[in-house]
Amino acid sequence: MSLFSYVTEQNKRMAVPLMGSVGARLSGKQPELCLENVELHFQALKALEDVFSPDILFPIMDLTLEAEALGLPIMYLEGVPAVAEHPVISSGDIAELKGRDLLSRGRIPLFIELAKKMKEITNSLVGAYVIGPFTLAAELVGTEELAVRIILDVDFIREILEFTSEVVSLYAAALAKRVDLVMILEPTPVILSPYHFAVYVNPLLAKLSDVIRNSGAFPVLHICGDATHLLDEMPGSGVDGFSLDSPVDLKEAALKMGKKHVVIGNIATVEVMLEKNAEEVRNTCNNLLRKMEGVPNFILATGCDLPPRTPEKNIRTFLESSLQY
């Protein structure tokens, strides 16, 4: 079964707030502690399931796992993990990273174990995250340096992307054997032109999507920020669905994606879910739901991961809104 078939065969509009960190708050734990401990993370997700029962249960979002497993130092900024250094500047640096047993390094084993345990607590779909190959390259090289190299050093770009594609595919395959859906987190390509997205990103995503699908899960692409300029190229990525952020017009996206793909989004995480009251959240959700009537391949979701202190009432209102459509 495809993700499109699964979504369109439901007897209700699916609702998926991305809210792993909220689960940490509900369980009384700091998100960074959950990211370091399988049992604490599991308790956070169980709290989410017990309180909200979303249609897809996701863990806490973390874009540093693969980079950390490759040896890069990680720091926490207000509880959110970030890569502290971007040490790769040459082919020799890439060579030094090869041959490492990624699945046994850093916190990767913890997240693989968590993926296996998540189905114990929900009858809904279980999701997992991997970083996208292009964004992992940006973590290794630095975003600004990567952007410069795309213009000035094509050979290096192809080499680093081939390497990151292999790294992500290895981890994605391990997750896809244990979950129902793998979301590929690719925020960095918003800096690219449609041409460079088609040339450098789509081929990697197509290969990664095949790996995820062949390992038993649905591949979904998530891009933060305003990816409107990339919508025409995204169908070439090979994924089953697109999770898009609040600046993107979802109706326009659905028209460009066609009827084989699922469109997911895109209520603003801070401006709406965190900062507005419940009635304003309801109105925002209802406006989007009305706009997307007649689009069966649409899942109501947040544009990205919710801040831990998002009001519980706002999340309940979000979920209740979907039941009316």
Image (cartoon, rainbow, N blue to C red):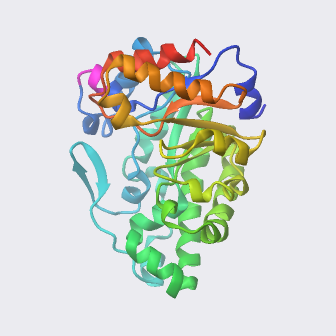
Vertical comparison of 323 with 150: above or below: above
Vertical comparison of 62 with 164: above or below: above
| Residue in the foreground of this view, choosing between 284 and 314 | 284
| Residue in the foreground of this view, choosing between 298 and 106 | 298
Q: In this view, does 3 lie to the left or right of 94?
A: right
How many numbered dots are placed on residues in this image? 0
Vertical comparison of 15 with 184: above or below: above
Which of the 4 image quarters holds residue 163? bottom right
Q: What residue is shown at x 28% (from left), y 45% (from top)?
A: 80
Q: Where is residue 121 in the image (x, y as percent from the top left)?
A: 49, 17
Task: Let me know if residue 12 appears in the view.
Answer: yes
Task: Please identify the quadrant where the N terminus is shown.
Answer: top right
Q: What residue is shown at x 68% (from left), y 64% (from top)?
A: 203
Q: Position of residue 290 (x, y in %)?
A: 61, 24
Q: Give the range drawn in magenta.
A: 24-28
Which of the 4 image quarters holds residue 231? bottom right
* Residue 89 falls inside the magenta stretch: no
Q: Where is residue 162 in the image (x, y as percent from the top left)?
A: 59, 70
Q: Which residue lies furthest to the bottom in this view?
A: 152
Predominant secondary structure in magenta?
Answer: helix
Q: What residue is shown at x 62% (from left), y 16% (from top)?
A: 325
Q: What residue is shown at x 57% (from left), y 84% (from top)?
A: 155
Q: Where is residue 62 in the image (x, y as percent from the top left)?
A: 39, 45
Vertical comparison of 155 with 313: above or below: below
| Residue in the foreground of this view, choosing between 286 and 169 | 286
Task: Let me know if residue 177 appears in the view.
Answer: no
Q: Is residue 225 left or right of residue 82?
A: right
